[in-house]
Amino acid sequence: MIQSEIFYLFSIISVGYILGNIKIRGFSLDITAMLIVALIAGHYGMVISDEFKFFGLAIFIYAVGLQSGPGFFETIKKDGVRLNLLAVLLVTSIFVTIYGIGIYMDMPKGTIEGIFTGSLTSVPALASALEVSNDSSISVIFGLVYPFCIVITVLFVRLLPVIFRVDLNKEIELYEKEQRQKYPDVFTNNYKVTNINFKNSCIDKQQIEDMTGAIIERIEYTNEEEDNRLHVNNIVRASGTSKELKKLEIILGEEIHDAIEFHDDMKVFRLLVACEDIVGKKIGQLTQLKTLRTVITKVRRSGIDITPDPSLTLRLGDKLYVVAPKEYGERITKIIGDDLLKYPAADFLPISLGIVFGILVGSIPFVIPGLGSIKLSFVGGILLTAILLGRKGRIGPIVWQLSPHSTSMMKTLGQLIFMATIGTNAGKYLVEAVSQNGFIPIYIALFGLIFSITMMTILCRVFLKMNFINILGFLSGAMVSTPTLTMINNTTKSEYSSISYAAVYPMSLVLMIILAQLGMKIF
């Protein structure tokens, strides 16, 4: 068993994990250490088959896609066009730089193509080039350049915050502040109905909510008729944005700043969404809560207060601020959940179904005039499917969202298996390839990468004033570099970069495939 691939795999993971956590003056190799250990192991014959690579890649990308899905389309609406144009510019810059140097040095077309596809560490781009020309030199040079570019890309992006003197903790704070600004704060105020129009006619509570957008939590009646209508001199407690509450004040009469004691049986509950039955459902669909006279006054998500619009889809871990009769407290808690540890640790049906759908989507060809048939590939299909399913939340009884610990486990396990496998396979022929072809292809590939990434970072940071968290995610997505994204998430201890990564990945992958074929056809 010592000679088995399972033994090799977990030995490499163990050694790489230990070395990656060693810090010297605050800097650590992190996931890059795993790659270096795997390269050395591959050179000495400890090779792990590609099936492990695809397994690790599948569960990692699927988890990233599910997690990015809810915020993906908001990013596309706001920055999608700009991010994808920048991704096109980066990939095109690498292409032009490498082909320009290669043509100037009078290199064979197959060698240049191998340098380009290897610099991007893109197997789909390599396969695309081989469809045009079955030149063996493409694969040889790809194999030579590939391991160096994986390691240097991860390391260089890791050093970018140091080079540009960026405090990532401050960037995360700014990122979170920007996200909060998208959603106005939700306040809770008391009002007295003094509008004389309420003397002649009583207006239903729901009508007031529809007109203002505010949520009326409680009503202190001055008469015996608790009919859910508003009367003169009633005291009202309501929640909403400052704009919504201003409308409410205009309609009702005046705001009361003194503390008010309500003489009803209502109580405020703060509950976490942790029940599989309501995850992925819209607030308006929660009929059980309505029958229990329950009012959701606010939704808190990732530190942001959100108005509980009936069309808002609930996500696992949302905190609901709920006003309801005390006697129904236990029933309401059971409906909402409130305990994330009781959420199913891993429902394997949505995981396996989602990955199967993703592989099928990635295998569907689409035709681009002049270039022929192109596929999204294994990774692109799974990522796109996971983003859509993560956004949807649930389809019928199937809940696509996973618990935080399940998502974290999938990502960690997937990335470790993937990194160990690609490293051993790249290290197997590394020394032999260097001895036969020299270091010139490696130098060209690394120059193309470092020059283009540096210029793009300057453009994004200095001229476009982008948050560095978004820059790092965009760079890893534009390079379709899963190891780089892994390093970024580990370094920043957040998943924010995954959103911009997912926003540009599909476009970048397709562009790489197109440029790989264009290089063989045009030059």
Image (tube, grey):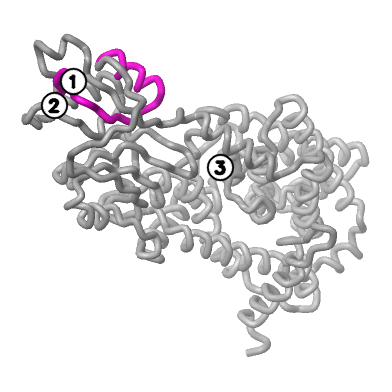
Marks 2 and 3, Cα distance to the nearest angstrom? 52 Å
- Residue at image position (61%, 80%) is 6
Instruction: Return the x and y of residue 48 as percentages of the image width and height.
Output: 66, 74
Residue in the foreground of this view, choosing between 234 and 510? 234
Specify few, some or many for label 1: CA neighbours under 10 Å numbering under 14, 14-19, or 20 or more. many
Instruction: Return the x and y of residue 212 as percentages of the image width and height.
Output: 29, 20
- Residue at image position (71%, 28%) is 465
Secondary structure under tag 3 reads helix
Marks 3 and 1, Cα distance to the nearest angstrom? 50 Å
- Residue at image position (57%, 38%) is 176
- Is residue 9 shown above or below 224? below
- Is residue 263 shown above or below 248? below
Q: Which residue is mark 1?
A: 233
- Is residue 230 shown above or below 55? above
Residue type, label 1: Asn
Left/right placement of residue 64 relative to residue 395 reads: right
Q: Which residue is mark 2?
A: 222
Q: Is residue 324 magenta?
A: no
Secondary structure under tag 2 reads loop
Residue type, label 3: Ile
Left/right placement of residue 282 relative to residue 67 reads: left
Residue type, label 2: Thr
